[in-house]
Image (spheres, rainbow, N blue to C red):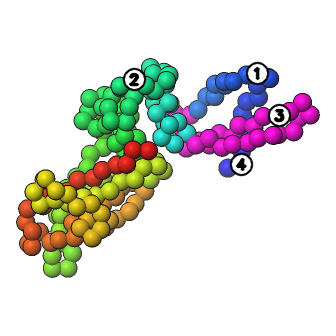
Amino acid sequence: GPFQIIDEKPSGATTSTIALNAGVEDLVLQVSTYNSIGDTDAASPVDLLTPHSWRYRTFGDIDPNLNAPTSQWNADADGDGQTNLWEYAFATNPRSGSSVARCESRFSIVGENTFLEYRVPRDARRSVSITGSVSGNLSSWLSGAPACVVAEDQPTHLLFRSAVPVNESPRQFMRAGIAVP
């Protein structure tokens, strides 16, 4: 909806506390400053789902400078086997081991062929790039098309499919990678 004024602070104020309803994540804050006449001289939206904003909202209470090992993208803050970057992409809580979303492998029949697929949960509002890869030996990986194609691109998941049917190459492995924001 349209922007609403939710708080006004006197000159020199640099912080504000805003009460949110539980589970609300999609917020854009527009911060405006005023000169002595009252005219606005700047307005800039702040997306709370950007990687830096999310990290600060998630770890700022225990690591205000975001430099502790626990708050880094490659850390697993809650020990559930998923890095903070994966938790960001999956929209799970990196500080709760019970908040987990897992990838899953499966076979899919397309025409007369059977293909290996890899379903990756995600929240499409998160600014990450997820790439699928396929391998026949676990030592060399082929990423993206033509070896690994996106069969489904949904807001809640990506489905990667090996381009080679399993009857032509029965030993196949798939994985997904996320680019660090």
Position of residue 172 in the picture relative to residue 143 (left or right):
left
Q: CA distance from mark 3 to mark 2?
A: 36 Å
The residue under label 3 is which amino acid type?
Tyr
- Residue at the spot of label 1: 12
| Kind of residue at disc 1 | Gly
**Where's residue 29, x and y in %?**
65, 39
What is the C-alpha distance between the residues marked 1 and 4? 27 Å
Residue highlighted by disc 2: 68
Q: Position of residue 155 (x, y in %)?
A: 43, 56
Circle 1 or circle 4, nearest the eye: 1
Mark 3 Cα shell of 10 Å, populated few (<14), some (14-19), many (≥20):
few
What kind of residue is marked 4?
Answer: Pro
Q: Which residue is mark 4?
A: 2
Tell me the element at label 4: loop
Identify the residue position indicated by label 3 in the image. Answer: 34
Of the two numbered discs 4 and 2 on the same chain, state the one appearing first in sequence: 4
